[in-house]
Amino acid sequence: MNNLKEFSVGIPSKGRLRKDVLNIFKKNKLNLISERGERDLLGSIKQYQNIKILYLHAREIIERLGDGSLDVGFSGFDLLKESEINTQKKINVLKRYNFGKATLVVAIPDPWIDVQTVADLEEIAFEFKDKKKKRLRVATKYPNLTREFLFSKGVTQFKLIDSLGATEAYPFTGSSEIITDITSTGETLKANNLRILKDGEILKSEACMMISKSSGNKMGLRKILKLLSKN
């Protein structure tokens, strides 16, 4: 297989997703090698020297699959759907896994007892505009999905705030009124006195193996995908 074309595979560089993806390689007896250990950004597979492993941020994996500089990548479905439409069109989801499961939701402060649904949120948004002369601020790391969801529910009077850290803290530091955030159990939201709106589920997500459409015809790629697809 060494005489075949070189392929690149993107693996998340940190977090639980990285560990779970590395387990896929381990289960399939694919020995990953990194010269400098866990912090290395480059690696290879002992048995298949033509496969280059790149350890990247999960969001970057999506971008690089989209521009064709990565052949195969592991990332979250949420990050794929958050990316630009043109990027999404260039990527195929080959396999969804039973890990990395989480849901993107709209969460509001507990004291907002009159707000239970997105329709109630719309009323609050108009109140903010009319009485306070400002827009309802929504902190998020998912501006595209959040905007699309709120518009689809008829909520238009809001302003998106880019979250640069722990999104759940934003309402209590005066940085936003509400948030959208990815959660697996909802416990972190509860711990921060936030609750999910009854119809506030934006997207269900899980870890996926994806392929760049531009790599689809590369000789030998199917063999690699078969190796990685075993359970």
Image: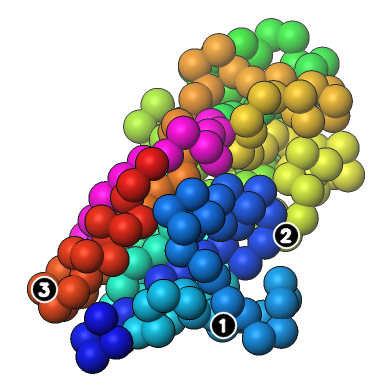
From what the image shows, is residue 91 above or below residue 138?
Answer: below
Label 1, on which residue? 42
Q: Residue at x 28, y 66 (%)?
A: 224
Q: CA distance from mark 1 to mark 3?
A: 24 Å
In the rendered structure, which segment of residues is drawn in magenta? Answer: 85-104
Which quarter of the figure has residue 133? Answer: top right
From what the image shows, is residue 43 above or below residue 177?
Answer: below
Marks 3 and 2: which is nearer the front?
A: 3
SS assignment at label 2: loop
| Residue 157 percent location from the top left of the image | 52, 38
SS assignment at label 3: loop
User: Mark 1 and 3 residues: CB-CB less than 8 Å, in contact?
Assistant: no
Q: Is residue 64 visible?
A: no
Q: Residues within 10 Å of mark 1 (few under 14, many from 20)?
A: some
Q: How many marks?
A: 3
- Tag shown at residue 217: 3
Indicate the quadrant containing the N terminus: top left, top right, bottom left or bottom right: bottom left
Q: Is residue 33 left or right of residue 65?
A: right
Front-lying residue, 53 or 12: 53
Type of amino acid under label 2: Leu
Front-lying residue, 129 or 171: 171
- Tag shown at residue 174: none
Label 2, on which residue? 164
Q: Is residue 133 left or right of residue 58?
A: right
Front-lying residue, 40 or 190: 40
Nearest to N terminus: mark 1 or mark 2: 1
| Residue 150 percent location from the top left of the image | 45, 34
| Residue 93 percent location from the top left of the image | 28, 51
